[in-house]
Amino acid sequence: RKEVEQDPGPFNVPEGATVAFNCTYSNSASQSFFWYRQDCRKEPKLLMSVYSSGNEDGRFTAQLNRASQYISLLIRDSKLSDSATYLCVVNTGGFKTIFGAGTRLFVKA
Amino acid sequence: NAGVTQTPKFQVLKTGQSMTLQCAQDMNHEYMSWYRQDPGMGLRLIHYSVGAGITDQGEVPNGYNVSRSTTEDFPLRLLSAAPSQTSVYFCAAGIQSSNSPLHFGNGTRLTVT
């Protein structure tokens, strides 16, 4: 079983749609959680950290459920520019940062 | 501010050749790491370093060597390239905190024929 698992997609949604991505992790001792965005043939870039109480950054909302070892990312009012691959990232401590394989999103006009 | 700089951007090697992928950061971050990214596999950790003179293995270290003589530089060496090492390689740097994100270089696309 992979340490961090994501639905690879792709998710094809129209502009303005709401889309949600899920991620599960296997190590219950994981300490910190992030969502990164990766555009085609580019390096990953931090989208947002994920906090236990849930957090929001504009159209993006991230949630963490430690009991179920589950992370989610919700994108509201999708834009064409949101088309990318979204990587779920878990830090298990000891500088071990594990990346999920990513979920591809295509937003269409 | 350059952040994390990787060179070269592209490289083609023949099986058995050796080469070094360069990574430099100007953020004075203690932590640096190398990942490879393959289709459907996500990023996999090759080696990492928590400071000058300290390195450790990640998930897929075989076939790669690293050293960290300075805070700024963290080169990745392929001693005898194999086709299985065809991949995109990313170097990353961060501060020593599990709550802090990583900053990535632009990547090196390596093809081994």
Image (spheres, rainbow, N blue to C red):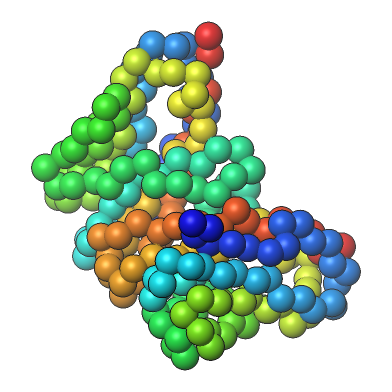
* Residue A97 in picture, x, y percent from top left: 38, 63
Considering depth in this image, is B25 or B17 the residue closer to the camera? B25
Q: Going by the image, does A67 lie left or right of B11?
A: left
* Residue A75 in picture, x, y percent from top left: 33, 25
Answer yes or no: is residue A34 visible.
Answer: yes
Instruction: Report the quarter where the C terminus of chain B lies.
Output: bottom right
Q: Going by the image, does A99 lie left or right of B81?
A: left
Instruction: Tell me the quarter of the picture where residue A95 sits.
Output: bottom left
* Residue B62 in picture, x, y percent from top left: 62, 78
- Name, please, the residue furthest toward the left: A53
Answer yes or no: is residue A27 visible.
Answer: no
- Kindly identify the residue that appears in the image at 84 percent across and 77 percent down: B17
Considering depth in this image, is B100 or A69 the residue closer to the camera? B100
- Name, please, the residue furthest toward the front: B1
Q: Is residue A71 above or below residue B26?
A: above
Q: How many marks?
A: 0
* Residue A60 in picture, x, y percent from top left: 29, 29
- Kindly identify the residue that appears in the image at 11 percent across and 42 percent down: A53
Q: Is residue B106 above or below residue A18?
A: below
- Name, please, the residue furthest toward the bottom: B53
Considering depth in this image, is A20 or A27 the residue closer to the camera? A20
Q: Going by the image, does B88 lie left or right of B50?
A: right
- Kindly identify the residue that appears in the image at 41 percent across and 72 percent down: B28
Instruction: Tell me the quarter of the picture where residue B83 sits.
Output: bottom right
- Kindly identify the residue that appears in the image at 46 percent across and 26 percent down: A82
